Image (tube, helix red, strand yellow):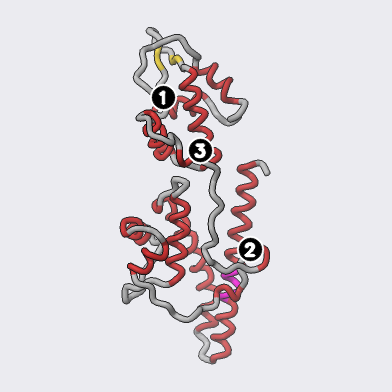
Amino acid sequence: MTAAGRQPRDGLSIGAVLAQLRGDFPDVTISKIRFLESEGLVQPGRTPSGYRQFAAADVERLRFVLSAQRDHYLPLKVIKEQLDAADRGAEPPVPSLRPPRKLVSLGAPAGDHGLPAPEDFEPGRPVRVTQEELLAQSGIDAAMLAELQQYGLVRPGAAGFFDPDAVLVAKTVRAMTEYGIEPRHLRAFRASADREVGLLEQIVTPVYRQRDAAAKARADEVVRELAALSVTLHTLLVKAGIRGVTGG
């Protein structure tokens, strides 16, 4: 996978490279190969007249990049860092392209079939988690915590304490970073959750405005049931989307 500033030499044309790659990567195009070159992920030589000439090492490098994107969902920045490390002779050259580890249980409750049940959203006994405790329990460092707060993924209360769910969020994000995902990539999750919460608020706020305790209890029950249904729908839609991506 050695890249280089090599001298132009005999090799494959970009069309020939495309033909070699198409069997394993049917969606690859000449434009895609040119884009990867523009990002510095492959550096083919040139003929005196300016035509690209790809060596076998260039094709291997392209296969690596395309596999990392397709099978491991790695951003190009992370892939380039791995290739640069390989070019420097780092060992192992591509540590992130091991078979994905099965994520450990984060302790989050789940209903039947792994989907949430309304009781999972019942408030438990209030527990205040300090920043030091969150860092120790989640295994992240202060810099990552600052990023999580910057992008709204965890939010301390007014007194500066976190809740146990913040620890689970931090653990989850830490696991996702092993696949090249950064906290900034997860802003959409925060925005989506806020929209879902906003919808639930619209539905139950009129009930909460009623003064009797029975109405408040009904509203609490509706919130829990709708929250479980919302998360279930989100999960099923993601599963359906993944099937579309993988062809399953």
Q: Quadrant of residue 38?
A: top left
Residue occupied by mark 2: 114
Mark 3 falls on what kind of element? helix
- At a point 39% along the width and 61% down the height, the residue shown is 152
Q: Which mark is residue 108?
A: none
Residue occupied by mark 1: 2
Q: Position of residue 156 (x, y in %)?
A: 36, 70
Discs 1/3, front = 1
Does residue 20 lie above or below 119 as drawn? above
- At a point 53% along the width and 80% down the height, the residue shown is 206
Does residue 13 lie above or below 152 as drawn? above
| Crowding at mark 1 (Cα within 10 Å: few <14, some 14-19, many 20+) | some
Which region of the structure is painted magenta? Answer: 223-228
- At a point 62% along the width and 61% down the height, the residue shown is 233
Magenta region, main secondary structure: helix
Instruction: Measure the C-alpha gap from mark 2 to mark 3.
Output: 28 Å
